[in-house]
Amino acid sequence: MPRGLHNKVALVTGAAQGIGRGIALRLVQEGVHIALVDMHQEKLQHVQQEVQALGVQASTFIADVSQLEQVALAIDHAESSLGGFDIMINNAGIAQVQAIADVTPAEFHKIVDVNIGGVLWGIQAAAKKFQQRKQKGKIINACSIAGHDGFALLGVYSATKFAVRALTQAAAKEYASQGITVNGYCPGIVGTDMWVEIDKRFSEITGAAIGETYKKYVEGIALGRAETPDDVAALVAFLASEDSDYITGQSILTDGGMVYR
């Protein structure tokens, strides 16, 4: 069991479903109070009910992570509603399946604003809050296997995740002297709604049957199965805990054996 998490306060962006929901539920099992942030109020409230059923506090806040002011307000709300602020998990992100030749300016700006901007503003706002509170803190960013290898038809998505690795490394160096660690987690093929949409887009572009792309990628996993949100959440819980206090600037692969670094 990870040490030092009981009664800490964490904020999770993109918490309404998928990996974000999995992270929130895992952290509450360790006694963490959770601020759930997303764009989807109804789904957020459902996750809030799941969390509260486990006996910890949970708040919800609607925010667009591509907007610094909204991220900062979400952190303020977490602090005021839950009585503290210790862990920032910049989980929110979107996928984009598109040949490089066909990417439009609008598509480019949308994914950059969410996947890079959301992490940058989350780092910035969380570090500022830790400084105001005169305390150490943990910042944990959603990266990907696509942050270590560029994948065909996922070129811009991969670029955003390479950028998350760079931000994670730079922020770790800038904030280390203040006791703030910054790390990332790099999932592989996770069986969530996002991969349903990725598989559908691959089908539209390549003509592959629905499910075929997902199956192909899963067959390439050394451990022989698709990843679950719980697999990702286990790493995040470790990174949020005292057990990772001497780790910073790392974007750790958790993919069952696909990309090796």
Image (cartoon, helix red, strand yellow):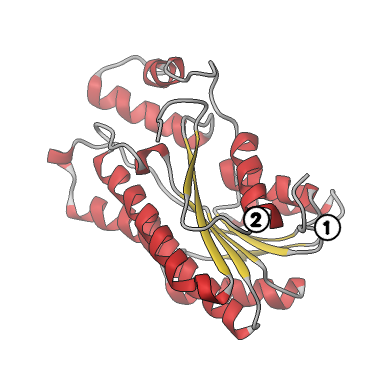
| Residue at 38% across, 55% down | 164
Q: Secondary structure at mark 1?
A: loop
Q: Please name the amino acid that badge 2 sits on.
A: Ala
Tell me, yes or no, if residue 46 can be seen here. Answer: no
Q: Is residue 213 above or below residue 232?
A: above
Judge from the rendering whether residue 15 lies leftward or rightward of residue 123; answer left or right: right
Judge from the rendering whether residue 118 lies leftward or rightward of residue 11; answer left or right: left
Image x and y of residue 25, in percent:
72, 46
Judge from the rendering whether residue 88 lies leftward or rightward of residue 124; answer left or right: right
Q: Are marks 1 and 2 in contact (CB under 8 Å)?
A: no
Q: Please name the amino acid that badge 1 sits on.
A: Val
Label annotation for residue 240: 2
Q: How many marks?
A: 2
Q: In the rendered image, which residue does mark 1 sit on?
A: 56
| Residue at 53% across, 29% down | 191
Callout 2 environment at 10 Å: few (<14), some (14 to 19), or many (20+)?
many
Compare residues 231 and 69 and report the one nearer the observer. 231
